[in-house]
Amino acid sequence: MSGMSATRDPAASLRAVTWRSLAEGVGQIFFQANPWTGLLILAAFLVADWQMALLAAIGTIIGTLAGCLVGFDADNVGMGMQGFNGCLVGAAVYTALGAQGWAYVLTPVGAVLTAPLTLFFAWLFARPALKGFNLPYTTAPFCTAASILYAASTSIHVESSAKHVVDGTGDAFLTSLLTNVSEVVLVNSVWAGALILLGLFIASWKVGLAAVMGSVLGSLTALAMGESASTIEQGLAGYSGVLTAIALAVVFHQANVASWCYAAVGTVVTAVVTLLMNDATTFPHYTWPYILTTWVFLLIGSKIAALRRT
């Protein structure tokens, strides 16, 4: 569903903007229209830095308002569907620029940009050649906007950020089970990962279990491919697989044995794509490994009788 209003009534959409819809916008990073999940994700940002949390909140609010103005309907806005891309833009700007003044300029710019980008991807997937596959725009607007901002701001990048938070020593694999979850929002912290995972289980035990599966398989794949312990421990090998597992197991397919098995395969493929991208470039690829793998698997899955779309 595109979420576009036939009458394009921004006033009605703006009335749907409440604290709950904004919190759900944060939760929608993991596909959850649950305000408590969203608040726990915000708490995960706070674990990294209060200014990262602030920029994420600014991105959520401005992205939501921009979505209203370009014509997304009140139901779409009320479920937080226009907030999550802006939220991630705020987090990405912080990882590149830290808390300098420019971060507070570029975050609103990027958050506003996610609205027309969302409109574009919704339009693209509504074209006759793709409409029957019901592909989601998911975090593609965030990745596109964040990449533009990153490339345009190289002269003011900082060397360290919240994604380098150190929680202590320990086995790389065990640590990664939580940092894989936290790195979805660009934070490297077992405590942040624990808070997010708690939020996912509050939303749905199936979603929480899928996230765990995605994290485990992502790290195991990285180990099998000989990835460094440092990369695995920081969650840089398995974070996209967390989203793929949730998406294919319980969000875009009706949950059954086939969807869980299919999601497991998709998670492994996502981990491989992530590691190949890590090796190919130092440019941040954000959640593109999840997005590209999920789109391909949804296209293939449309031909598999045992898989039923939601």
Image: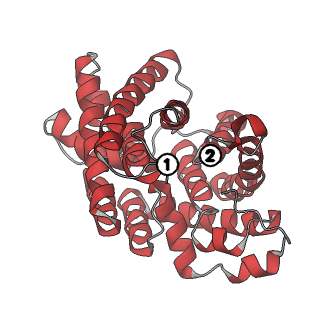
Q: Earlier in the sequence, mark 1 or mark 2?
A: 2
Q: Nearer the viewer, residue 285 or 76?
A: 76
User: In terms of image quadrants, where is residue 262?
Assistant: top left
x 65%, y 78%: residue: 17
User: From this viewpoint, which residue is outermost toward the front?
Assistant: 305
x 74%, y 56%: residue: 115
x 53%, y 52%: residue: 91
The amino acid type of the residue labelled 2 equals Asn
Q: Determine contact: label 1, label 2, CB under 8 Å.
A: yes
Q: Nearer the viewer, residue 10 or 54?
A: 10
Q: Is residue 52 left or right of residue 226?
A: right
Q: Is residue 39 left or right of residue 25?
A: left
User: In terms of image quadrants, where is residue 233?
Assistant: top left
- In the figure, 61 relative to 109: above or below? below
Instruction: Identify residue for label 1.
Output: 309
Q: Is residue 112 left or right of residue 143?
A: right
Instruction: Identify residue for label 2.
Output: 134
Mark 2 Cα within 10 Å, few/some/many (few <14, many 20+)?
A: some
Q: Position of residue 41 (x, y in %)?
A: 40, 63
Q: Position of residue 271 (x, y in %)?
A: 37, 28
Q: Position of residue 3 (x, y in %)?
A: 70, 62
Give the structural element (helix, strand or loop) at label 2: loop
Q: Position of residue 239 (x, y in %)?
A: 38, 40
x 80%, y 81%: residue: 11
**What is the C-alpha distance between the residues marked 1 and 2?**
9 Å
The amino acid type of the residue labelled 1 equals Arg
Query: Does residue 304 appear in this view?
Result: yes
Q: Nearer the viewer, residue 310 or 3?
A: 310
